[in-house]
Image (tube, rainbow, N blue to C red):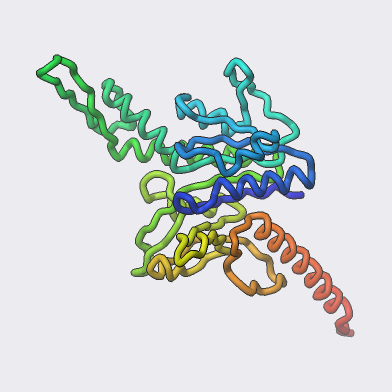
């Protein structure tokens, strides 16, 4: 199996973490390989707690770890021992490396730079946004800081480098998640839905870093019907988001059967991957038939 790099993005509660759990089960059942998940989100891991308890998914949480070091170690497949020390040799029996998420880890980098600005550290050459507030009642002084444009550039550059680094890991699947950003399309008057990193500069760029890009969404429960999770295949227009164009790429080859739908409901990343693998197989068979037909063409004397 050739390595697949996957980007899965969507709003909160759309089911991104659950899809990692489904992929982890699928890979474990097929290969016996486990999933290592680097988790930087503030939300919990309840949706994949069974897979964690069974040892199918092993989690490294960012928590209070310095985000710069966490990102560095995560992108290289390092993990912590029982004493909390990073082991610098990746495990061999890993089928999936998961990273949650682009946005949350980038926010950690931004917060770190804000704190350094409050301490007078200049990052990126921009002017620091920092000041102090003194409480007259108790004499306590608070150091307040903010981010400047240079901070955004540093965070975006670092995230770009480390995502590329993570894709060098030896595993069948590398998957990153992200929240969703809604922005103006630079080539039209429409809105675009894409992955949110930090700021908007990387939103249209991130999908091209990956073999496959999917957007996942959820329709709230209504009229007694349960909420519905939807996985979108490729670029699409979302009427529910005001006709915004959603970014996606499934890279279906020439000769593959046309899709009968651009969604999978209920959302299933595994079904999407199986659909793509089936399309690739059909494309190979179609290619063989075309080549055979060319071989039977008469040659000129």
User: Left or right: 251 with respect to 154?
Assistant: right
In which quadrant of the rendered image does the C terminus lie?
Answer: bottom right
Q: At which x and y percent is residue 194?
A: 45, 56
172, above or below 119, in the image? below
Q: Residue at x 41, y 33 (%)?
A: 108
246, above or below 6, in the image? below
> Could you say which is closer to the camera, residue 69 or residue 37?
37
Q: At which x and y percent is residue 264?
A: 60, 64
285, above or below 51, in the image? below
Q: At which x and y percent is residue 116?
A: 32, 24
290, above or below 186, in the image? below
Q: Residue at x 81, y 69 (%)?
A: 285
User: Left or right: 165 with respect to 257?
Assistant: left
Q: Residue at x 74, y 64 (%)?
A: 278
> Could you say which is closer to the camera, residue 84 or residue 74?
84
Q: Residue at x 33, y 29 (%)?
A: 123
Question: Which picture quadrant has residue 110?
Answer: top left
User: Left or right: 107 with respect to 15?
Assistant: left
């Amino acid at each position: 199996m050739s390595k697949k790099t996957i980007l899965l993005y969507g709003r909160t509660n759309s089911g991104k973490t659950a899809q990692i759990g489904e992929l982890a089960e699928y890979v474990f059942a097929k290969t016996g390989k486990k999933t290592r998940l680097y988790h930087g989100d503030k939300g919990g891991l309840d949706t994949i707690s069974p897979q964690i308890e069974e040892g199918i998914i092993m989690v490294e949480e960012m928590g209070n770890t310095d985000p710069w070091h966490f990102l560095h170690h995560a992108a290289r497949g390092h993990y912590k021992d029982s004493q909390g020390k990073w082991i610098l040799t990746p495990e061999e029996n890993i089928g999936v490396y998961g990273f949650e998420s682009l946005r949350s880890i980038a926010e950690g980098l931004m917060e770190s730079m804000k704190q350094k600005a409050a301490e007078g550290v200049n990052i990126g050459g921009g002017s620091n946004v920092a000041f102090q507030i003194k409480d007259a009642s108790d004499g306590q002084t608070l150091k307040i800081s903010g981010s400047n444009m240079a901070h955004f550039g540093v965070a975006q550059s670092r995230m770009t480098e480390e995502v590329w680094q993570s894709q060098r890991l030896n595993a069948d699947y590398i998957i990153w998640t992200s929240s969703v950003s809604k922005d103006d399309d630079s080539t039209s008057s429409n809105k675009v839905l894409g992955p949110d990193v930090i700021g908007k500069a990387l939103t249209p760029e991130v999908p091209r870093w990956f073999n496959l890009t999917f957007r996942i969404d959820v329709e709230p429960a209504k009229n007694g019907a349960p909420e519905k999770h939807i996985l979108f295949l490729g670029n699409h227009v979302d009427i529910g988001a005001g006709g915004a164009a959603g970014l996606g790429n499934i890279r279906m080859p020439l000769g593959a059967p046309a899709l009968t739908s651009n969604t999978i409901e209920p959302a299933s990343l595994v079904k999407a991957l199986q659909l793509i693998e089936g399309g690739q197989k059909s494309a190979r068979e179609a290619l063989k038939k075309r080549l055979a037909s060319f071989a039977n063409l008469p040659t000129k004397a």
